[in-house]
Image: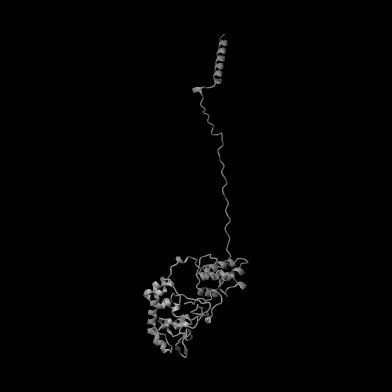
Amino acid sequence: MKTLNRTLLSLVAVTSLVAACSTPPTGNDAAVDTYVPPATDAPADTFVPPADTFVPPADTFVPPTDVPTMGGTPCERYCTAITAACTAANAQFADAADCNAWCSGANLPVGMPGAADGNSVECRIYHAGVAAMAGMAAAHCPHAGPTGGGVCGAIDFNAGMAASFVRVDRMGMPAVSTVLVGAARKNAYNDANPNGDMAFAGDFIGSLTGLHMALDDDFAGLNLQTCSMVTLVGGLPECLGQEYAPGRTVASLVVPNDVLRLDLTAAAGFPNGRKLADPVIDVTLAVLFLRVNQAAPGRCGAGNCSPATLAGVPVNPARNDVAMGMFPDTFPYLQPAQSP
């Protein structure tokens, strides 16, 4: 009997435990999930990447020794480049010394590095560099040469509007602004426009009268007859009213405006235009000081005075002493400037 009771009690206890476990928890009876995965569930990340043992190869490039250096003055850099690139049939100079002599005497502006046109040293350096490339010498050596080949010999004109410039000096007929306008009125004359030059007629007459007073006796001593600043011709002092050519008075060269004129129907030559070889100062002095009147010419030596009288003496050098006075027949038609 006792054994049976124990068995029944055990069975009740097991049944109660099963019932308790099979009933869903509610409210505060809900179990808290306190599960924590063991630290050893995931293996530690012990991967270590291999050390970077790559070593780039040493830079063993050595530039070729035959590439010309580009140091020194602009002319030296230019001559180094062009004599290296332009050789044989494309040579522009006999050698570097010949090039340097030309460059030093040409007095070219240096220009901006990389300039591909315009009359400068840098433009020539640029084209000498292009000429050094394969197959480019024939086309670019002339551009790098003395004439510029129509590329580096071109003149850089400032195309700005006239109002953007400031006039510093003006020059129409030679000696007018430098001799016939006194120092006190020099700036006013330079600031004025040619169409207002009648306002300076008194200055012209006053200066020329003073010059005649100082120099007439010297001209007479040379057997040259001077014009008069007292005798009137056409209402003007003879020296201004006389005609240096039929229908053309000396005064008309300066007033009503001081400009250099060119009459295409008459022979060219100063004062009708101005050629490079014209002895402009000798002609100017002759028409201002000598009696060159077409109607009543003066006597100069064995013949009549004329605008060419002093050019035949001459008072000034008869010609440029470079290249025996000859001018090139290509633009800019001038010999290189002489070194001091």
Q: Nearer the viewer, residue 155 or 251?
A: 251
Q: Residue furthest top?
A: 1
- Residue 257, position in %: x, y? 44, 74
Q: Residue furthest bottom?
A: 302
- Residue 329, position in %: x, y? 56, 77
Q: What residue appears at the point 45 percent right and 78 percent down from the top-left corner?
A: 252
How is this picture coloured? one colour
Q: Residue furthest front?
A: 234
Q: What residue appears at the point 56 percent right and 20 percent down from the top-left corner?
A: 22
Above-or-below relation of 39 to 339: above
Q: Does 244 sit left or right of 66 as displayed?
A: left
Asked where in the image residue 221 lies, by quadrant, the reply is bottom left
Above-or-below relation of 184 to 133: below
- Residue 92, position in %: x, y? 58, 73
Tag count? 0
- Res 205 visible: yes
Q: Nearer the viewer, residue 31 or 3?
A: 31
- Residue 95, position in %: x, y? 57, 74
Quarter occupied by the N terminus: top right
Q: Nearer the viewer, residue 116 or 88?
A: 116
- Res 282 visible: no
Q: Does 133 sit left or right of 193 as displayed?
A: right
Q: Nearer the viewer, residue 23 or 238?
A: 238
